[in-house]
Amino acid sequence: MATTEGLVPITRAYLARYYDKYPLPPLPDAATDLAARLRALSADLAAVAPITPDEELLKQEAAGIPAHKIDENMWKNREQMEEILFLLNTSRRPVALQQKSTPEDTEIVSKLDDIEAKLKDMLKKLEQFQLKNADNVFNTVMTYMPQDFRGTLIRQQRERSERNKQAEVDALASAGGSIRDRYALLWKQQMERRVQLAQLGSATGVYKTLVRYLVGVPQVLLDFIRQINDDNGPMEEQRERYGPALYTLTKLVLAIRLYLHVSLARYGQRKIDKDDIAVLQHAVIIYTEEFVKFTEFIGEVFVNAPFFISAEDAGAADARKSDEYKETIIPAGKTHEVHI
């Protein structure tokens, strides 16, 4: 069990200094330009057949503002990849594409297959990233837990909880739940994990005594898990630094899904021309390449980020961050007034 003596939870000011060492390379302008182009192409297809209510919802989401939280965006990207792969499943493609009725259809099929392969690979990588990230956080927290039967009980409880959550997801799928329904449940489960942590950190009275002394959880760890996900807590620094790039990628994948949905739905009336499929292919290439770079970068930053720091470091960082902090030398025999 790692000691927490003399340590305090990470502060936003200290985390800002840590993130200064890890500037995120900017996304290419094409990421934004291609999303706008795909939304415009999707709007043009309304002339072929009116936009359906489901398509209108997709259109609004693609034009909207992504969620603020990093992990919520990760789940949203994973959901969109699954939705796109659902559209690209061979059995769900337009009949002309299934039969490859013309050379043009055959060429479109080839390009759609390439898009499908890229997104399948990216989806697998994102799933692994999320699993690894969750394990890293849990294992780091466990280093501050008692390394005896109590630590074993905590691990067993987590495994049991995760099995129950997976059973919920499986039951929803068996009942015919949609991909959207499944991801709504997955995000709900993620928020439940956060609430449970926050409740543990905010425990009071007899229950707090049981948590601290019977289970052996250090107070500094309770303080950390209580405030880590606050709207203006330490993770807000992470969102401000790295969120904008992720939001751009979220908007791009939403635009890719929107265009694929409306273009395949109207394929019998208007086939996808070469220029448009080229735009789509380019968008998928940019999206998958940049998403891989982002997850690799963010994975390295997060895995090395500190959870706890010394009280002295926390105080120094907060002082540097504060606009109210000023140092004044007062000569002997002089007075200095500060108006508050």
Image: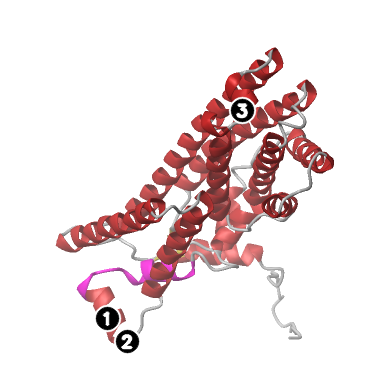
Q: In the rendered view, would you say 334 is above or below 23? A: below
Instruction: Tell me the quarter of the image containing the N terminus.
Output: bottom left
- Which circle's residue, 2 or 3, is located before the other in the chain? 3
Q: Which residue is mark 1?
A: 209
Instruction: Please say whether residue 106 is one of the residues in the magenta stretch.
Output: no
Say whether disc 1 or disc 3 marks the residue closer to the N-terminus. 3
Crowd around label 1: few <14 · some 14–19 · many ≥20 (10 Å): some
Q: In the figure, is residue 196 to the left or right of 99?
A: left
What is the spatial separation of the Cα atoms under label 2 and label 3, in whole angstroms? 66 Å
Residue at the outermost top position: 103
* Residue that numbered label 2 is attached to: 205
Classed neighbour count for the residue bearing mark 2: other residues with Cα under 10 Å, few (<14), some (14–19), many (≥20): few
Tell me which residue sits at (73%, 86%) in the image. 340
Amino acid marked by disc 2: Gly
**What's the distance in space between the residues labelled 1 and 3, CA to CA?**
66 Å
Q: Position of residue 46 (x, y in %)?
A: 81, 43
Q: Nearer the viewer, residue 340 or 174?
A: 174
Residue under label 3, please give it: 95
Q: Which residues are magenta?
A: 214-227
| Residue 190 falls left or right of residue 280 | left
Q: Nearer the viewer, mark 2 or mark 3?
A: 3
